Image: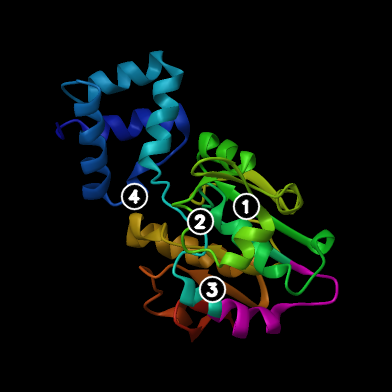
Amino acid sequence: MTDDYEYFKKQIQLMTGIDLSSYKENQMKRRLDSMLVRNKLKNYQEYVSVLRSDRAKLDEFVSYMTINVSEFWRNGEQWDVLDLYILPKLLKPEGIKVWSAACSTGDEPYSLVMLLAKYLPLHKIKVLATDIDKQILQKAREGIYTQRSLKGLPDSYKSRYFTEISPGLAAISEDIKRCVTFKEHDLLKDPYPVGCDLILCRNVLIYFTNEAKERIYSNFNKSLNKGGVLFLGNTEQILYPAEHNFTLISSFFYKKQ
């Protein structure tokens, strides 16, 4: 199943622009092999033929391979650190420029808006949220979530910003949705926004090769204003932050020097 992986990577880059060489090979092969089994295919070459002829299958592939796992207030203790120690030093009267990179289904940028609403009126809150997956961005724009996604969210936010629309499903407030702009973005090839005060990119970089991560850290640093902060996930850390012009200020929070 794995002898034609190089061929597959080249074809996927031609079809989607996604460079699988920047993702950890063993993890990608495991996910890809499970897709072959699911689709009853013998090898990667057969899968390429399917993806070329079936746009829905190609969209399914991109969604599965880009690993969309998210929930509101994931690792709540880190959100407490953001609330109590990070945001108060970043907030300005005119607001704050925030980028939620690899935002998946929108749980993270919406969590951030709810937190910022403690400090700023909603009309001053603007969050850019990006992901490589078009399908997942559409789900994020719809703003409908399962109770499982909301399990870690403080009750005060649930009662204020969500409406139950059916058993087990809740819709987020339109006022919160209006604060977030969702855009398609590939961390490996697209231009990065500039002038950011805070960037969130959590539980995504673990899937990239070390070389790809080095490039991404460097680009994040260029995106931040001086003193801006990068917020990573609980499974990630920058081993030598000074090499990328960062200082570790709390676990998983890095300040631009």
Q: Is residue 184 above or below residue 212?
A: above
- Counting from the top left corner in percent of width and height, residue 134 is at 54, 35
Residues at marks 1 and 3 touching, judged by CB atoms closer than 8 Å: no
- Residue appearing at x 51%, y 42% in the figure: 132
Mark nearest the camera among 1 and 3 is 3
Report the magenta residues as a range: 81-96
Three-letter residue code for mark 4: Tyr
Could you give the CA–CA distance between mark 2 and mark 1, rounded to whole angstroms? 19 Å
Give the mark nearest the N terminus, 1 or 3: 3
Residue 23 got which mark? 4
Q: Is residue 41 left or right of residue 248?
A: left
Q: Label 3 is placed on what type of residue?
A: Trp
Can you identify the residue that label 2 sits on? 150
Sequence-wise, the earlier of marks 2 and 4 is 4
Q: Spot the residue most to the top.
A: 53
In the displayed structure, would residue 32 be above or below residue 145? above
Give the distance between the C-alpha atoms of the residues marked 3 and 4, in whole angstroms.
28 Å
Q: Secondary structure at mark 1?
A: strand
Residue type (three-letter) at the residue carrying disc 2: Leu
Q: Badges 2 and 1: C-beta atoms under 8 Å apart?
A: no
Q: Are marks 1 and 4 in contact (CB under 8 Å)?
A: no
**Front-lying residue, 173 or 80:** 173
Majority secondary structure in the magenta region:
helix
Label whose residue precedes the other's in the sequence (1 or 4): 4
Q: Position of residue 94 (x, y in %)?
A: 85, 71
Q: Is residue 13 magenta?
A: no
> Which residue has dot 1 on it?
129
Q: Quadrant of residue 29?
A: top left
Q: Is residue 150 left or right of residue 6?
A: right
Residue positioned 37% across, 31% down in the render: 61
